[in-house]
Image (tube, helix red, strand yellow):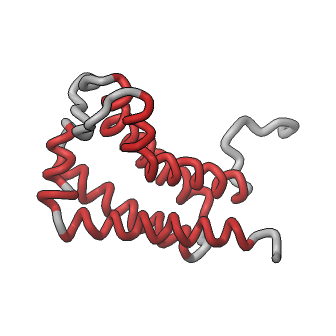
Amino acid sequence: MPRNVPLLLIRILVGIVFITEGVLKFLYPAELGAGRFAHFGLPWPHLLAPAVGGLEIAAGAALLFNFYTGYAAIVLLCIISTAIVTTKLPVLIGHPLGAFHGVKAEHPGVLGFIHEARTDLAMLFSLVAILMDSGVRTGPVRGRR
């Protein structure tokens, strides 16, 4: 099997997941778009949800078609990191995090967090793998003048 096939499969899966989630924000705004953003305590939900949905569709498509994958991964890493902090971290600590209410969890704490965040964590680590494979330099460039 060629070396890049596993990462190709990861890129396809992550791209499809983010495209689907972006589309769902537009199709079901009360449940998955602005209404959900408002429920979690995010600011300007009627502006933020469509913006995030559009970015998810565009960056997900970029991953799917192997177009600027590193930069698309950076955009999606920002989105998924924000989602984890605003919706799943309150489960970990067992109470709202400032204005962020998080999801309603049966079992707060580490195990509840891992259960609630399993898809988000899979996307997070998959995006890190995609970014690492893309060749995009995210740190300081050494040896250049």
- The residue lying at 32 percent from left, 36 percent from top is 86
Depth check, front residue: 120 or 24: 120
**Would residue 74 be found to the left or right of residue 95 on screen?**
right
Q: Is residue 1 above or below residue 39?
A: below
> In front here: 66 or 144?
66
45 or 117, nearer to the observer = 117
Quadrant assignment, res 41: top left
Q: In percent of the image, x 26 and y 23: which residue is there?
A: 95
- Residue 26 horizontal/vertical position (percent): 22, 67
Residue 62: x %, y % from top left: 52, 70
What is the quadrant of the N terminus in the image?
Answer: bottom right
In the displayed structure, does residue 96 sit left or right of residue 35?
Answer: right
Question: In the orientation shown, which residue stands out farthest toward the right?
Answer: 143
Indicate the quadrant where residue 18 lies: bottom left
**Residue 137, position in %: x, y?**
71, 47
Q: Quadrant of the C terminus?
A: top right
The mark total stands at 0
**Going 68% across and 66% down the picture, which residue do you hit?**
7
Picture residue at 47% right of the left edge, 64% below the top: 59
Observer-nearest residue: 14 or 119?
119
User: In the displayed structure, does residue 118 sit left or right of residue 47?
Assistant: right
